[in-house]
Image (cartoon, rainbow, N blue to C red):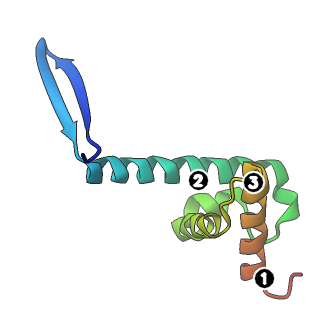
Amino acid sequence: MKNVMNIKRTIRGRHINIRLTEHELTKAYRMRRSQYLAEDFRNMLDSCSSDYEHIRPELLNQEQWLYAELEDLYDQIDDSNRSYNEMLRECLDRLEKKLDPQKK
């Protein structure tokens, strides 16, 4: 059986049942995951921005491709044996190196 989710709402006195398909659930999950990752990267960068020359919180807010790049890096290194913050930090380190290839 495929995964589905039934959402029951009462809107203006009417009972509404909304059924999300497996595809819709996956899409919603990925959207929310991206939002959480973006927020976590912003928070991490706010706390350690002095460590990075080329990545600034205001730049992240203006350049959406940077979030996509960070998310791709996160997917590459995602490892349940490592702490979440450690992986976020590694992604920022790797992106900084990509933006400044001379940095070691």
Above or below, comparing residue 49 to residue 5 in the picture:
below
Residue 81: mark:
3
The kind of secondary structure element at disc 2 is helix
Q: Residue furthest left?
A: 14
Marks 1 and 3 sit apart, C-alpha to C-alpha, by 29 Å
User: What residue is rendered at 69% in x and 56% in y?
Assistant: 57
From what the image shows, is residue 32 above or below residue 96? Answer: above
* Direction from residue 66 to residue 46 in the image, left or right: right
Q: Amino acid at mark 3?
A: Asn
x and y percentages locating residue 78 in the rendered image: 65, 61
Q: Residue at x 75, y 54 (%)?
A: 81
Local crowd at mark 2 within 10 Å, few (<14), some, or many (≥20)?
Answer: many
Give coordinates of residue 91: x percent, y percent: 72, 65
Q: Camera-side residue: 75 or 88?
A: 75
Between residue 46 and residue 62, name the one nearer to us: 46
Residue drawn at (54%, 67%), measured in percent from left and top? 68
Real-space CA distance between mark 1 and mark 2, rounded to the nearest whole angstrom: 21 Å
Q: Left or right: 63 with respect to 41?
A: left
- Kind of element beneath mark 3: loop
Q: Which residue is mark 1?
A: 100
Instruction: Give the amino acid type for the residue marked by disc 2 in the picture.
Output: Ala
| 50 with respect to 2 (left or right) | right
The answer to which quarter of the image holds residue 60 is bottom right
Q: Position of residue 87 (x, y in %)?
A: 74, 58
Q: Which mark is residue 38?
A: 2
